[in-house]
Image (cartoon, rainbow, N blue to C red):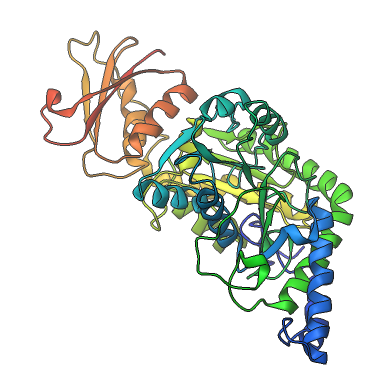
Amino acid sequence: MSPNENVYFDAATASPLHPVARQALTAALDEGWADPARLYRSGRQARMLLDAARETVAEVLGARPDEVSFTASGTQAVQLGMLGALRGRRRTGRHLVHSAVEHSSVLHTAERFEADGGEVTAVPVDRLGRVSPTDFAAAVRPDTALAVLQSANHEVGTVQPVAETAELLGALGEERCPLLVDAAQSAGRTAVPGGWSLLTASAHKWGGPSGVGVLAVRKGTRFNSALPADEREAGRVPGFVNVPAIVAAAASLRAVQAEAAAENARLHALVERIRAAVPRLVPEVEVVGDPVGRLPHIVTFSCLYVDGEVLLGELDRAGFAVSSGSSCTSSTLTPSHVLAAMGALTEGNVRLSLPTGTTAEQVERFLTVLPELVSRVREPLGLDLPAPAGAGPATAPLVVDQLGRRCPLPVIELAKRIGEVPVGGLVVVLADDEAARLDIPAWCEMRGQAYEGEAPADAYGADRGFAYLVRRVG
C-alpha cells in the first residue's frame, strides 16, 4: 500500500458504506421515494419496498416483521425503547437496571428517568469489562420495570453474557422482567443472543447508511410510547420513514451476515496480531478487554504517560483514523466510564475497530509507525532520564503537588519521582483532576507498586483536591 494512503480503523463508530447498500440505495431512490402510507401506485410501491426491508431485518435479528420498527438512529432506538418499556410497566415499579458499561444513550436515558423520580442500579463489571449474570439478576427487584444489557461493548469489544443473564431473569418470577439488548456493535457480525424482550441496532455500524436505527419489541412486552401518538411504525416511532435508506440498510445487513463467518475469522486474526504486538513494541501499554470473549474486529489499549488526544492527532497525520475513550480528550475532559468501571487505565487510550476489507499490510504499517509516534509524544516528558538518587531512609512521605494539572501529568510525575523514595517509602500525589482517582491505582497495578488509597488533601497542606498514597514496592 502507498505510505500516503489513509487507513480507516474506526468501524465501531461508523462503517464505510457497503457496496450492496450503495446499489440498493441508488435503486430505491427512484422506486421508494413516495409515502408508503398512501394508496396510489407510487405509495404502494414504496410500501412494498418497506415491507420487504422489514422482513429482511426481522429474519436476520430473529424477530417477527411486525415486531420491527425503524428509527432515525441507534441512539433514538435505545431511548424510545427504554422510555416505552418503562412507561408500559410503570405500574410494576420505577426501578431500572443496567450494566456500568452501557452506551451513553442508555446512561443519559437512565439519568432522565432518575431525575423524574425513578431509581437506577448500575451493575459493576470485572476487569475485562464483563458483567456477572448472577450479579445482574440479583440487582433485579419485584419493582424493576426494565433491565438493559448490551450484546458487546462499544469501547473494548467484550461480549456480554446476554443469554445466560436472560435465562436467570426468566427464572425470577411469573412476570419476567423485560430485557432490552443494545446490539449496535454486534448486529450482522455475530449471532443475535436469545432471551431479549427489546432489541436495538444501528445501520451505520454494519455498513448501512446513517440515519437508520432498529427497534424490535417482542409480542407480549408491555410498551407505551413516551411520545405523542402516531400511526406509523406500529405507533412506536413518529414521522415519515426514509424508505430508500431503510432498503439499503436491510440489503447491507443481509450481505454482511452472509460474509460474517469468513470476514470475522480474518479480522480476528488481525486483531490477535495487534493484541500480541503492541505490548511488545511499545513499553508501558495495557491491552484492555476480554482477550477471548470479544468481538472479532475491536482492540483497545492504553499507553501510560500519553495524552490520548495528542496521540490520536499524531496517528491522523500518519494516515490512521482511530478513536479514543481517553480521559484526556478535550471533547469531554472526563474519564471513559467504560474503562473506569473496568478499573483499567484511562489515559492514552486508543481503540482500533477494523472495517470489512482491512488488510494485513495496513495492520503491519500501523504497527510500524505506532512505536515511533508514542515515543515522540513521550519524549518531552523526560521519562528516559535516570531517576534521582535515593535520599536514604525516608522520614516523611514525598509530596508531589499536581493540583491544577490534568491527566496524564499526575501519573507522569509519580513515575518520574517514585525513585526518590526508598523501597517501602510513601509518595503522596496531590491532584484535583478526577482522572487521577482512576489512573493512579491503575498505574500502581501495572507497575507493581502498592496503592494505599486516598486521604483528605488538607492533611498535606492543600486547600482542594485529594491526596493519593502510593507505597514503593520496588
Please tell me which residue is depicted at 58% across the width and 38% down the height of the picture.
Answer: 282
Task: Out of 267 and 252, give the one closest to the viewer.
Answer: 252
- Tell me where residue 32 appears, x and y as whole percent: 78, 84
From the viewer's perspective, is 312 left or right of 287? left
Residue 203 visible somewhere in the drawing:
no
Image vertical order of residue 244 relative to residue 387, above or below: below
Res 309 seen here: yes
- Give above or below for 267 relative to 468: below
Marks counted in the figure total 0
Q: Nearer the viewer, residue 146 or 455?
A: 146
Which residue is at a point 27% across and 21% down the rendered structure image? 427
Towards the viewer: 185 or 170: 170
Q: How far across and how far down the image is residue 305, in percent?
A: 42, 39
Question: Is 365 on the left or on the right of 143, as rendered?
Answer: right
In this rendered view, identify the residue nearer to me: 454 or 194. Answer: 194
Image coordinates of residue 458 in percent, x first then y, are 12, 27
8 to the left or right of 48: left
Residue 179, placed above or below residue 57: above
Which residue is drawn at the image coordinates 47% and 39% (left, top)? 93
| The quadrant where residue 310 appears | bottom left
Screen quadrant of the C terminus: top left
Image quarter (top left, top right, bottom left or bottom right) of the N terminus? bottom right
Is residue 188 depicted above or below 379 in this figure? Answer: below
Q: Horizontal placement of 201 versus 251: left or right?
A: left
